[in-house]
Image: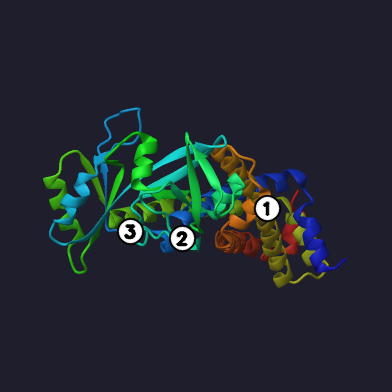
């Protein structure tokens, strides 16, 4: 029997141990993948608004929706010292063909600031019932450019298509305010500070001049993102290393006699070392495959639930971020090598005589 065939059979020989090992490694992988797919959308700088400060209303426990601010504040903030640009938006959702579609309302002149790029068709006109849809929503709704879409009791024309990975629809601020029945209201204001100005200082000045607002900076968001990164990627990785280490150490302890026999019949220390490392890699890669399948299926079901549609599975696969899976696969290999190192060293150093004496 070849070495590679022996390693593969040995990895799955004891069913209970193999199942526990696969479960122990798969769960952290699922956490890393779910987090990675979410962060890929949040951190895509090609579609991130060009703002330094974000302003919202103060949440007072109202069930009716998110806290709002008056759109008059946009012009007031433009007069602040050190402020380069201010853009107000309103995000909500509308129902069309029994499908819930997220929509962002803004002035068409602010589309560049909000990183909304139309690759087919054109940007909407502020005074018309027009929409720009993402490719994702077009597939969900089974619509094409220049088709019409019923929003409430009004008909909107699809005039542009964007490839924003966050998906959604885009139309004029006035249209979205009408859809939400919140005339002259916004749920977020984005502020761009002039180059060289102190963002923290300007933020404090705005906060002091305006009551009933919640203000946070992009720097604060980035710090929070880094903290979340540590929690949802580094911590699962550490857990995966510990679990893999425990399972592989137990595997070595349970197989002392077998390892002693292999060394007695001529297996060199290096070959025993490679046996344990190879088994760890095989089990980790299998866990990655299982974790990937569970994550993809879970994300697909969540998308269907959120959008209330019969989303095409092939289209969904095309929208996934391949880099997330490649990065996670790299993490899995690192976990396998780190976790398998100590058990492999211990197995390779076993004395054939002492190992064969084990009961």
> In whole angstroms, how far apart are the C-alphas of marks 3 and 1?
35 Å
Of callouts 2 and 3, the N-terminal one: 3
- Cα–Cα span, label 2 and label 1: 27 Å
First along the sequence among labels 3 and 1: 3
The secondary element bearing badge 3 is classed as helix
Inter-mark Cα distance, 2 to 3: 13 Å
Residue marked by disc 1: 314
What colour scheme governs how the chains and residues are painted in the rendered image of this protein?
A: rainbow
On the question of residue 250 being in view, the answer is no
Mark 2 sits on what residue? 122
Q: Nearer the viewer, residue 113 or 37?
A: 113
The number of numbered discs placed on residues in the rendered structure image is 3
**Mark 3, residue position:** 109
Query: Residue sitting at 21 percent across and 42 percent down?
Result: 213
How many C-alpha atoms fall within 10 Å of the one at disc 3: few (<14), some, or many (≥20)?
some
**Can residue 185 be seen at all in this image of the molecule?**
yes
**27 left or right of 77 in image:** right
Image quarter where the N terminus lies is bottom right
Judge left or right: residue 230 versus residue 275. Answer: left
Query: Tag 1 or tag 2, which sits nearer the N-term?
Result: 2
Label 2 vs label 1, nearer the camera: 2
**Residue 253 picture location, percent across and down:** 68, 52
Name the element at disc 1.
helix
Q: What element carries label 2?
A: loop
Whole-percent x, y for residue 173 in the image: 34, 47
Which of labels 3 and 1 is toward the front?
3
């Amino acid at each position: 029997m070849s070495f590679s065939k022996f390693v593969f059979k040995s990895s799955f020989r004891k069913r209970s141990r193999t199942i526990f090992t696969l479960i122990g490694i798969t769960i952290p992988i699922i956490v890393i993948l779910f987090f990675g797919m979410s962060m890929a959308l949040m951190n895509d700088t090609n579609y991130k608004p060009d703002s330094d400060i974000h302003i919202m209303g103060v949440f007072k426990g109202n069930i009716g929706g998110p806290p709002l601010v008056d759109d008059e504040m946009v012009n007031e903030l433009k007069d602040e010292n050190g402020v380069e640009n201010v853009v107000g938006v309103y995000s909500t959702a509308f129902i069309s063909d029994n499908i819930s579609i997220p929509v962002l309302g803004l002035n068409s002149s602010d589309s560049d600031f909000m990183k909304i790029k139309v690759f087919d068709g054109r940007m909407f006109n502020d005074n018309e019932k027009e929409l720009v849809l993402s490719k994702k929503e077009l597939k969900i709704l089974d619509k094409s450019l220049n088709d019409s879409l019923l929003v409430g009791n009004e008909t909107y024309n699809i005039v542009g298509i964007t490839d924003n990975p966050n998906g959604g629809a885009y139309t004029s601020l006035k249209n979205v305010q009408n859809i939400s029945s919140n005339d002259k209201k916004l749920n977020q204001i984005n502020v761009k500070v002039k180059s060289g100005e102190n963002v923290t200082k300007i933020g404090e000045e705005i906060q002091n001049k305006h009551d009933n607002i919640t203000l946070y900076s992009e720097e604060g968001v980035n710090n929070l993102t880094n903290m979340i990164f540590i929690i949802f990627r580094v911590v699962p990785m550490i857990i995966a290393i510990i679990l893999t280490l425990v399972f592989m150490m137990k595997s070595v302890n349970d197989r002392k006699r077998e390892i002693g026999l292999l060394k007695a019949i001529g297996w060199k220390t290096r070959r025993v070392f490679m046996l344990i490392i190879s088994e760890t890699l095989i089990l980790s890669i299998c866990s990655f495959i299982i974790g990937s399948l569970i994550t993809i299926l879970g994300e697909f079901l969540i998308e269907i639930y959120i959008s209330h549609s019969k989303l095409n599975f092939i289209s969904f696969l095309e929208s996934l971020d391949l880099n997330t899976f490649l990065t996670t696969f790299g993490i899995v290999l690192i976990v396998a090598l780190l976790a398998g190192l100590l058990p492999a060293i211990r197995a390779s150093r076993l004395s054939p005589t002492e190992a064969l004496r084990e009961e």
